[in-house]
Image (cartoon, grey):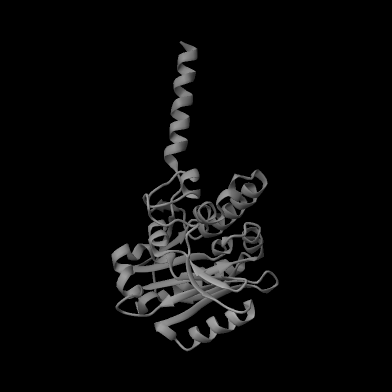
């Protein structure tokens, strides 16, 4: 009887562990007051806890939406160890959405990003331990704003997230869109900056993470077109997912790529 009880207990424990999964987002808290005051509060919390706020913007020009992008040296150092576009995981994001006079504060789950973008490196015990430590530190900081920290957006098992593909035949992390190839990293960075500064194709630069020694830069790009940009697609994918913005491009060496939309939008 005891053996049977223990066996059932283990099955239930393992089942619970599997079902818990990893969610893409966390609702942190709900704030009163203006969007300006709420964003200032979040930014002050981040900078006061050792994070660098590297970009802010209003997706789709909607005053009821706001994004704060942050990182630090520990996060960047981890992501640099992964190679293969892993630096995309170095940009952490908090989203603010005004609803019924209140401001909902959410964030992309760092653990979710690490499994999705750092992939097989998360199978290495030491690397995984560092990544999950960073995840805990970020969540501890954000939780100090409020005690809810409720996950949302659906759960997925860690091993499935590493190999994430929305469905058979769809692109995954290993199938990026090739944007351009330049004569050098320096030329590529200068060209991308120039195009974004001029607002080419109704775009705007939101943030940069530059690792010049490694010839890598991640650039967050706001999409201002009312027909094809955030104003068009955010209401479709859900404005509660505002922390997923902005879209990113990455320049590694002399090649600029971005994640395929059919992967990126299904993932976040």
Where, by quadrant of the figure, is residue 242 drawn? bottom left
Q: Residue at x 46, y 43 (%)?
A: 157
Count of numbered badges drawn on the protein? 0
Q: Which quadrant holds the N terminus?
A: top left
Q: On the rendered structure, is 86 left or right of 74?
A: left
Q: Is any atom of residue 100 visible in this view?
A: no
Return the residue found at the far bottom. Answer: 198
Q: On the rendered structure, is 154 left or right of 6?
A: left
Q: Residue at x 63, y 47 (%)?
A: 129
Q: Residue at x 49, y 13 (%)?
A: 2
Of residues 90 and 163, the one nearer the viewer is 163
Q: Which quadrant holds the C terminus?
A: bottom left
With respect to residue 128, does 50 lie above or below? below
Where, by quadrant of the figure, is residue 246 drawn? bottom left
Residue 37 rendering spot, x and y as whole percentages: 45, 75
Residue 13 rendering spot, x and y as whole percentages: 47, 30
Of residues 81 and 29, the one nearer the viewer is 81
Q: Residue at x 61, y 50 (%)?
A: 121
Of residues 237 and 26, the one nearer the viewer is 237
Residue 149 rendering spot, x and y as whole percentages: 45, 53
With respect to residue 118, does 48 lie above or below? below
Return the residue found at the far top. Answer: 1
Q: Is any atom of residue 138 visible in this view?
A: yes
Residue 92 rendering spot, x and y as whole percentages: 53, 64
């Amino acid at each position: 009887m005891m053996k049977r009880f223990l066996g059932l207990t283990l099955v239930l424990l393992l089942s619970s562990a599997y079902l818990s999964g990893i969610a893409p987002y966390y609702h942190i808290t709900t704030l009163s007051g203006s969007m300006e005051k709420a964003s200032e509060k979040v930014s002050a919390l981040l900078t006061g806890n050792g994070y660098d706020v590297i970009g802010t913007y209003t997706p789709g020009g909607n005053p009821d939406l706001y994004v704060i992008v942050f990182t630090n040296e520990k996060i960047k150092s981890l992501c640099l160890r992964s190679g293969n576009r892993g630096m995309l995981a170095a940009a952490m994001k908090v989203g603010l959405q005004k609803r019924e006079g209140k401001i909902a504060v959410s964030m992309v789950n760092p653990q979710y990003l690490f499994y999705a973008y750092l992939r097989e490196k998360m199978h290495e015990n030491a690397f995984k331990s560092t990544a999950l430590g960073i995840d805990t530190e970020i969540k501890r900081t954000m939780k100090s704003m409020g005690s809810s920290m409720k996950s949302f957006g659906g759960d997925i098992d860690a091993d499935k997230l590493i190999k994430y593909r929305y469905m058979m035949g769809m692109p995954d992390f290993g199938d990026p869109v090739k944007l351009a190839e330049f004569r050098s990293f320096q030329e590529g960075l200068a060209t991308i900056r120039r195009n974004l500064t001029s607002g080419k194709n109704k775009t705007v630069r939101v943030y940069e993470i530059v690792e010049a020694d490694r010839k890598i830069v991640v650039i967050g790009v706001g999409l201002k077109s009312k027909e094809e940009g955030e104003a068009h697609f955010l209401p479709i994918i859900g404005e509660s997912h505002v922390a997923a913005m902005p879209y990113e491009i990455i320049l590694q060496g002399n090649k600029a790529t971005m994640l395929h939309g059919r992967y990126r939008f299904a993932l976040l």
